[in-house]
Amino acid sequence: MNLDTIVHVGSRPWLPSPSASNLDAWHEDDVPVAGIFDLGGEKILFTAVGGVDSDLTVWAYLPLSAAEYFELDELIFESVPELICEIERRFEGRCFALASARSFVIDYWTALLEPADSVYSASTNFLKDLVAALKAEVRASKNDPGFVQDDQMTRLMRVEYFRSPQAIGRRDEVRDFLVNRSVIGLVLS
């Protein structure tokens, strides 16, 4: 499956595409946090990375083979930590898609072109790249007399990494995201 078809900006993280259907939520915390959905005849495993108690969240998506799906469908998890460990194991050494969402609406995403060690290391790299892009754009905006700040949205990034024409960040939202995630001690000013 082409990873670029899984996630669409503006969708809910647990059904990240208008074509996604048949949500099977394995764990919920006010919203579906982990499970499987159908997309174009394929089964996609999804999970929130690190929880959903913040306004900004990170999500991971992995296409499953038929054998993987049937194996997972037969498993019974006795605890949430056991479920999380199994999901994390499935992402190890694989290519998958990542997305960030604000108020459970996807705003940025990327498809990993090379296998990741883990869902957490890939998420960390995703966020580091976001920070680097933001810092570069903020520096450029300070040195660019033609930089225009919109009342609704500050242009912070437009990089191919996020592969989405809507990959435009809001300065305050991104700052809150980074502070809430304790990714860096950066304060954009």
Image: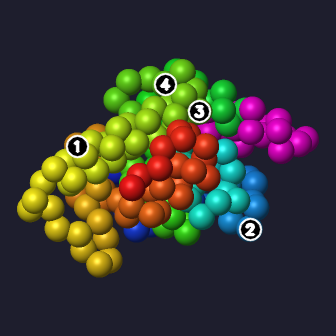
Question: Which circle, 1 or 4, is nearer the viewer?
Answer: 1
Q: Was residue 68 drawn as part of the magenta stretch in this picture?
A: yes
Q: Nearer the viewer, residue 33 or 151?
A: 151
SS class, disc 3:
helix
Between discs 1 and 4, the one toward the N terminus: 4
The percent position of residue 173, horizontal first and vertical second, equals 47, 63
Image quarter hosting the C terminus: bottom left
Mark identifier at residue 116: 4
The residue indicated by pointer 1 is 160
Please, what is the dominant secondary structure of the magenta stretch?
Answer: helix
10 Å crowding of disc 3: few (<14), some (14-19), many (20+): some
10 Å crowding of disc 4: few (<14), some (14-19), many (20+): some
Q: CA distance from mark 4 to mark 3?
A: 9 Å
* Amino acid type, mark 2: Asp
Question: Which circle, 4 or 3, is nearer the viewer?
Answer: 3
Q: Nearer the viewer, residue 36 or 124?
A: 124
Marks 1 and 2: CB-CB under 8 Å? no
The residue indicated by pointer 2 is 30
Compared across the picture, whether 6 is left or right of 154 comes to right
The percent position of residue 73, horizontal first and vertical second, equals 71, 43
Q: CA distance from mark 1 to mark 3?
A: 22 Å
